[in-house]
């Protein structure tokens, strides 16, 4: 029994001489093998959009009703840097980007939950409806303290 016949003891099949473990042989024409295409999964048509508007950035996360993330976007991932991330225009662009990807997956109707006091709150929600998603409800889920932590002691001058 030779090495080619017994795959357990012989050289790996499909590997040429001098190729390392991570490399694979290209097709005969010299072109690299085509990248495996990601399978687009379809989702139900209703979802939830979580908008977190902080003073420095705006984060948009689109999930299913069960909480599985479909798409996300932020002013930083769209390409804004520094103080321009905190603008309403940056929030609008981030919202449009996240909505476009979610709509390709089959999302049509959303409930919006807005958190935070940043400048991108309204523009993000407006961009969602302008991009073709039907906004069913808008809810403010900003955490508010019920008198919260104890304040610092008064400064005496």
Image: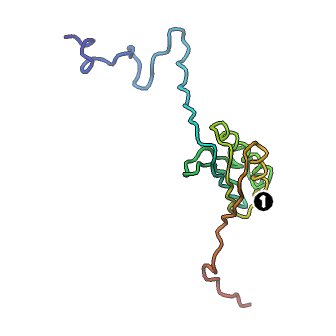
Q: Point out residue 32 in the picture as x, y percentages from the top left corner.
A: 54, 18
Q: Secondary structure at mark 1?
A: loop
Foreground of the two, 144 or 108: 108
Q: Residues within 10 Å of mark 1 (few under 14, many from 20)?
A: many
Q: Residue furthest bottom?
A: 156
Q: Is residue 57 above or below residue 27?
A: below
- Name the residue located 72 percent from the left edge and 45 percent from the top edge: 133
Q: Point out residue 119 in the picture as x, y percentages from the top left corner.
A: 78, 59
Q: Point out residue 100 in the picture as x, y percentages from the top left corner.
A: 70, 40
Indicate the quadrant where residue 114 lies: bottom right
In this rendering, position of residue 26 left or right of residue 109: left
Considering the image in quadrants, where does the C terminus appear?
Answer: bottom right
- Name the residue located 63 percent from the left edge and 52 percent from the top edge: 48
Q: How many marks?
A: 1
Considering the image in quadrants, where does the N terminus appear?
Answer: top left
Give the residue number, with chain letter if any, for mark 1: 119
Foreground of the two, 31 or 54: 54
Q: Is residue 148 above or below residue 96?
A: below
In this rendering, position of residue 113 left or right of residue 22: right
Indicate the quadrant where residue 156 lies: bottom right
Q: Point out residue 94 in the picture as x, y percentages from the top left corner.
A: 72, 47
- Name the residue located 69 percent from the left edge and 63 percent from the top edge: 140
Q: Residue furthest top?
A: 28
Foreground of the two, 109 or 126: 109
- Name the residue located 71 percent from the left edge and 42 percent from the top edge: 97
Q: Is residue 16 above or below residue 64?
A: above
In this picture the colour scheme is rainbow
Foreground of the two, 117 or 111: 111
In this rendering, position of residue 39 left or right of residue 123: left
Indicate the quadrant where residue 122 lies: bottom right
In this rendering, position of residue 75 left or right of residue 13: right
């Amino acid at each position: 029994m030779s090495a080619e016949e017994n795959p357990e003891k012989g050289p790996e099949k499909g590997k040429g001489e001098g190729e390392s473990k991570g490399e694979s042989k290209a097709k005969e024409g010299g072109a690299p093998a085509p990248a495996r295409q990601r399978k687009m999964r379809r989702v139900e048509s209703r979802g939830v959009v979580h908008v977190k508007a902080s003073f420095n950035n705006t984060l948009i996360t689109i999930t299913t009703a069960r909480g599985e993330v479909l798409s996300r976007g932020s002013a930083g991932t769209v390409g804004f840097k520094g103080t321009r991330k905190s603008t309403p225009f940056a929030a609008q662009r981030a919202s449009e980007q996240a909505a476009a990807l979610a709509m390709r997956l089959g999302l049509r109707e959303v409930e919006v939950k807005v958190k935070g006091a940043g400048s991108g709150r309204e523009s993000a929600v407006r961009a969602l409806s302008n991009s073709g998603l039907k906004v069913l409800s808008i809810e403010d889920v900003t955490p508010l303290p019920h008198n919260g932590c104890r304040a610092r002691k008064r400064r005496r001058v």
